[in-house]
């Protein structure tokens, strides 16, 4: 074993000892086990939902509308990944590992560490990696439990769920890099933790804004498309009706006669109402686009926590499966298509269609954009950390 | 660099920079040589820059200027640290580790293989008297016990050069003696030991050479004999009687008695006088004590004979040499005002 390997192993073992010495480490692992147990306790049959020996009649889903494998996938992605790993376990993980860098640079420890035949950059990055190992350990244990539940209870063995390990660790690493930088600058565990949670909140706001804007934008797009299609349809119908009426009335019409737009509009005022709605929707979209683009640019610079977590769903659940999951809870076989209200000219969009359209938009964002730019942010933060750590007098 | 030197420093300077403020000089051109196989002591008042110098050697602090080498490597080269052991001042090893784990961890960080670490850790725990405590967490240790573990971890890589920053800090008298014994044993193994300590009496017992750092520069450097050159001599104390001064004066060679009245001009005070022997060495009589600035015992025999012939009663004869504390106090005392320097002297001098 080389000197570098010995140092790396020693630092990883030391980080484990440091974390294991804290109660929170064990609390987080026990909670993970409980969540996995709760995951396994939920079931579905032809009569409905069950939890242990209780029947949950208020949930209107049966194994016919939602097969067990789809249920467990849904629970894993929506609750296991979406809430437990992304939020609760991450917060617990951040609290547990917040001291990793401050404890390295605290007076009394750093002298002994720096005064060893190891470069400062490697010392810092190894210490940083040891914090990520904790996240990896936690996610691996949870994912293994989820894999077993999916296989045993859902009947579908999906090794692909282990993609959750790198994806969650990468997601965690964005926040951990920022926490490391603040910990390095302030040497304070609590400050680094609070500032990181603040950044995370900012990212959440940006993500929420982005999701809202994309949601409105895609709905407006559907509205425009629906109106354009409906207007064309109504115009054709109206034109045919005008011709038919003229024919029935015995009016003379030149060969190949087509009613003019004015004639059509005059004959059917509803078209104008729809045109007004279309114009309004187009204007709304034109105003919305700069905001959608602006938010996209801001997100390009920042780490994309939401999209990173969503990658797992993207790569494990096909678009069709995703749509099926959405439809399972609506009780429909297909999403209800958007329609135009005959009285008001307003477009009516079903929530499922809106959600599917937004999902489609998010899925169109490339892997390079999601991971590449986020990792670029992380590399920039870590680079700054390395420069500060390498140049600082302790 | 001579291979005889473990540390050879030239023009080492460090100024702590502060944003939008004038920098604070800590070291202002250190010149220092530490020979291989010797025990070297570094002393100085608080704020003189001792810890800064040690940290520069250990790459913990980057110097503003530095020409010099340590174990043949330029200062700042991490490769040199493979053969260096270090006990930092105010160290705070993690409380969740046991004593044995601390030694093992820092051994691994120094690049020592597992088998050697295991073997040496046992020996070192034995050496510092901590074998029975090796499996207990550091949080249950006293300060002195942590210090012993600190010394053990500094030796895990069997270093050629060991830098000990305040090694006896918080250690009881028995522990201090044990640490002195460890240093003596290391010296017997031809290790070079660099000690930074406030406990001058202990440094005096173990150090071959010392340097006194004042205001960020080396005020004095050398062996104790070199540093006390011209200040050594002999002391003769006779029984305290009214004519003790006359007795001592008359015991001196004839030429030395013919001194100007000097300090004994006022017989009422009967304090004494200062003068020279015919050979040029100093004489100082103070009441019943005669101090002679001679270095050879043969030179005082005629004077002892004269005192005895005059029926004088000699209570004490001994060689005198300034202690390290005396040298230290001389170095940190302003020759113009007679006041000792206060902590942070390096900073104040340039403020």
Image (cartoon, coloured by chain):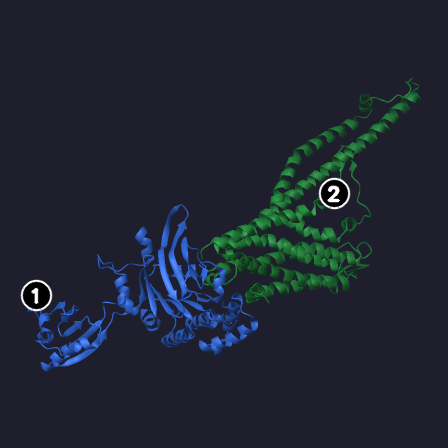
Residue A95 spot, x, y in % from top left: 56, 58
Task: Report in which chain the residue with disc 2 lies.
Answer: A
**Letter of the chain shown blue in the rendering:** B
Image x and y of residue A227, in percent: 77, 33
Q: Can you tell which chain is drawn green? A: A
Residue B173 in sight: yes
| Label disc, if present, on residue A123 of the rendered structure | none
Quarter of the image with the N terminus of chain B in it: bottom left
Give the distance between the C-alpha atoms of the residues marked 1 and 2, in whole angstroms.
114 Å
Q: Is residue B129 left or right of residue B229?
A: right
Residue, disc 1: B260
Point 17% across, 72% down: residue: B291
Query: What chain does mark 1 sit on?
Result: B
Q: Nearer the viewer, residue B342 or B193?
A: B193
The x and y percentages for residue A264 are 82, 24
Mark whose residue sits in front, 1 or 2:
1
In contact (CB < 8 Å): disc 1 and disc 2 = no
- Report the residue marked by disc 2: A357
Q: Residue at 14% across / 68% down in the picture? A: B276
Secondary element at tag 2: helix
User: How many other residues sit within 10 Å of disc 1, few (<14), some (14-19) or many (≥20)?
Assistant: few
The spot of residue B259 in percent (x, y) is 9, 67
């Amino acid at each position: 074993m080389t000197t570098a390997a010995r140092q790396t192993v020693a630092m990883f073992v030391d980080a484990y000892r440091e974390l294991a010495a804290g109660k929170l480490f064990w609390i987080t692992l026990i909670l993970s086990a409980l969540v996995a147990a709760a995951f396994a306790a939920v079931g579905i049959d032809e009569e409905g939902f069950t939890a242990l020996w209780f029947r949950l009649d208020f949930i209107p889903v049966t194994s016919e509308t939602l097969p067990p494998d789809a249920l467990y996938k849904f629970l894993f992605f929506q609750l296991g990944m979406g809430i437990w790993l992304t939020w609760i376990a991450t917060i617990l993980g951040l609290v547990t590992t917040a001291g990793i860098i401050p404890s390295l640079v605290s007076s009394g420890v750093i002298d002994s560490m720096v005064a060893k035949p190891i470069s400062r950059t490697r010392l810092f990055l190894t210490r940083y990696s040891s914090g990520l190992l904790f996240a990896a350990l936690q996610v691996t244990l949870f994912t293994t439990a989820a894999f077993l539940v999916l296989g045993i209870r859902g009947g579908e063995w999906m090794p692909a769920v282990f993609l959750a390990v790198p994806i969650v660790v990468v997601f965690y690493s964005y926040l951990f890099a920022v926490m490391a930088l603040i910990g390095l600058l302030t040497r304070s565990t609590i400050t680094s933790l609070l500032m990181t949670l603040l950044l995370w909140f900012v990212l959440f706001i940006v993500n929420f804004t982005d999701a809202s804007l994309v949601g409105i934008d895609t709905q407006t797009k559907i509205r425009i498309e629906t109106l354009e299609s409906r207007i064309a349809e109504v115009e054709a119908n109206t034109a045919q009706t005008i011709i038919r009426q003229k024919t029935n009335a015995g009016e003379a019409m030149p060969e190949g006669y087509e009613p003019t737009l004015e004639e059509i509009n005059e004959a059917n005022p509803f078209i104008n109402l729809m045109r007004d709605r279309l114009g309004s929707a187009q204007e709304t979209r034109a105003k919305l686009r700069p905001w959608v683009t602006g938010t996209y640019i801001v997100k390009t610079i920042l780490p994309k926590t939401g999209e990173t977590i969503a990658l797992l769903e993207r790569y494990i659940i096909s678009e069709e499966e995703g749509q099926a999951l959405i439809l399972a809870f609506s009780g429909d076989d297909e999403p209800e298509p958007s329609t135009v209200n005959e009285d008001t000219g307003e477009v009516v969009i079903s929530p499922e269609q809106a959600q599917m359209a937004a999902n489609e938009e998010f899925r169109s964002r490339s892997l390079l954009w999601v991971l590449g730019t986020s990792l670029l942010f992380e590399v920039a933060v870590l680079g700054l950390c390395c420069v500060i750590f390498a140049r600082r007098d302790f | 660099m001579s291979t005889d030197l473990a540390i050879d420093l030239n023009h080492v300077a460090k100024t702590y920079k502060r944003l939008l403020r004038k920098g604070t000089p800590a070291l202002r051109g250190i010149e220092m040589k530490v020979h291989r196989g010797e025990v070297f002591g570094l002393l100085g008042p608080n704020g003189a820059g001792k810890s800064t110098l040690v940290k520069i050697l250990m790459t913990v602090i980057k110097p503003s200027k530095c020409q010099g080498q340590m174990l043949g490597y330029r200062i700042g080269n991490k490769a040199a640290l493979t053969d260096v052991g270090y006990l930092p001042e105010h160290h705070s090893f993690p409380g969740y580790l046991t004593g044995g784990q601390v030694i093992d961890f820092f051994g691994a960080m120094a690049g020592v293989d597992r088998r050697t670490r295991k073997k040496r850790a046992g020996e070192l725990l034995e050496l510092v008297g901590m074998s029975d405590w090796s499996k207990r967490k550091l949080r249950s240790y006293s300060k002195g016990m942590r210090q012993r573990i600190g010394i053990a971890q500094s030796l895990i890589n069997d270093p050629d050069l060991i830098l000990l920053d305040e090694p006896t800090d918080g250690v009881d008298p028995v522990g201090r003696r044990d640490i002195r014994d460890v240093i003596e044993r290391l010296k017997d193994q031809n290790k070079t030991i660099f000690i930074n300590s406030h406990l001058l009496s202990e440094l005096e017992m173990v150090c071959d050479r010392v340097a006194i750092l004042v205001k960020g520069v080396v005020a004095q450097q050398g062996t104790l004999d070199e540093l006390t050159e011209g200040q050594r001599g002999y002391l003769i104390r006779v029984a305290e009687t009214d004519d003790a001064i006359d007795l001592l004066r008359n015991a001196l060679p004839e030429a030395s008695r013919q001194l100007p009245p000097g300090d004994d001009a006022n017989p009422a005070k009967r304090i004494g006088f200062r003068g020279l022997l015919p050979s040029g060495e100093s004489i100082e009589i103070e009441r019943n004590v005669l101090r002679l600035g001679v270095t050879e015992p043969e030179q005082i025999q005629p004077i002892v004979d004269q005192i005895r012939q005059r029926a004088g009663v000699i209570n004490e004869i001994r060689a005198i040499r300034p202690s390290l504390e005396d040298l230290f106090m001389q170095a940190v005392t302003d020759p113009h005002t007679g006041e000792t320097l206060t902590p942070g002297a390096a900073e104040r001098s340039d403020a």
